[in-house]
Image (cartoon, coloured by chain):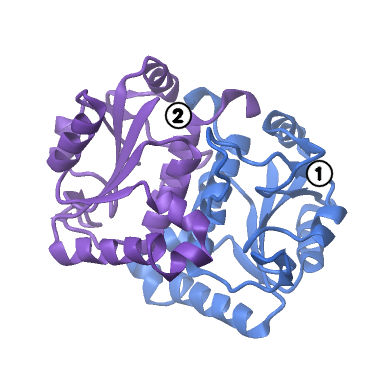
Chain colours: A blue, B purple
Amino acid sequence: MNVHVALLHYPVYNRQRQVIVSAVTNLDIHDIARAALTYGVRSFYVVTPLEDQRQLIERLLTHWRDGYGSHSHPERKMALELVTPATSLAEVVASVTRHSGQQPELWATGASLGESTLNYSEVRERIRNENTLLILFGTGWGLSKEVLDMVDHRLAPIQGVSNYNHLSVRSAAAIILDRLLGTENEK
Amino acid sequence: MNVHVALLHYPVYNRQRQVIVSAVTNLDIHDIARAALTYGVRSFYVVTPLEDQRQLIERLLTHWRDGYGSHSHPERKMALELVTPATSLAEVVASVTRHSGQQPELWATGASLGESTLNYSEVRERIRNENTLLILFGTGWGLSKEVLDMVDHRLAPIQGVSNYNHLSVRSAAAIILDRLLGTENEK
């Protein structure tokens, strides 16, 4: 299994469907790192083009990986070992390729993906076949068209039992990793 | 389907396995409310015996349901309509019973539940049979023995593919609701 995830803060939409750089949220990093470690994800990239936002990520990582937090909360340290800040999606793809010796398939996720999506069983099959996968999560109101146009596949949005489709990216990432990587027989 | 959830801030353990009242976290309320609405949960109780903490919840609810936030973020308003602050688990059980005309089955969740747990397919069956269910989530380091001893059933902990079992309660709640209430055929 060779699965990587990236959380993009650019290019994403805001509520008015303008392309923006969204702000980094600490709990996104903690929660998705913990879910990633739970499900055997190899690496978790947090992507923003803004230098000061990447410094904020670095400070959070230093606190929990090397500073006081590493002793007081060792389970956070373990999860945050997976995290790497990155400037752009291109940088992430280059990094995964370097570490895996293989260009990753890019998978987009999003609540508003409509046409041409693949379902979870199809992706599980590709994971079993040892493809290198990079799953992209968008903050704000989702990944912009620019990203969606360049990915290999789009994952079907999570539908609950209502028409409401406003999960937090933290919740959506947890559910998607569970669907793709969770052990079948415990469900 | 008649499923309710409660997030308990007491009685729960801290890291040293002492029973404490944990602090209310805003994002727990937002994230679990959004997941609850997505999956058709009827009500979401946020439980703490501390008066000032319940006031904090009320302020959050007022802001997003009636105040400025209700216009700027209507999708948060919708989700937070499900939320009721409560003083104790007993109060929640009484409220669910009053609204459902039926005493709910109590289901505990937790990362460290060992013996005598039931798996997800067994719970899905009970949901289909129209049982009234109240699913309990613990903050901090999990629901105390006092709660575990009084519930009807314990749900098997989420196991990923690693031994790491430190999901946030936000992530765990999202995954559990998806497993129990998500549409089978989209997986």
Give the structural element (helix, strand or loop) at label 1.
Answer: strand
Q: Position of residue A79 (x, y in %)?
A: 50, 58
CB contact under 8 Å: marks 2 and 1: no
Q: Position of residue B155 (x, y in %)?
A: 34, 30
Q: Is residue B63 above or below residue A142?
A: below
Identity, as a three-letter code, of the amino acid under mark 1: His
Residue lying at 75% horizontally and 64% vertically, measured from the top left: A92
Identity, as a three-letter code, of the amino acid under mark 2: Leu
Which of the two residues, A139 or B110, is positioned nearer the viewer here?
A139
Residue lying at 37% horizontally and 14% vertically, measured from the top left: B129
Q: Is residue A25 above or below residue B129?
A: below
Choose top left, top right, bottom left or bottom right for residue B49: bottom left
For mark 1, what is the residue? A153
Label for residue B180?
Answer: 2
- Subunit under mark 1: A
Q: Position of residue B149 (x, y in %)?
A: 15, 32
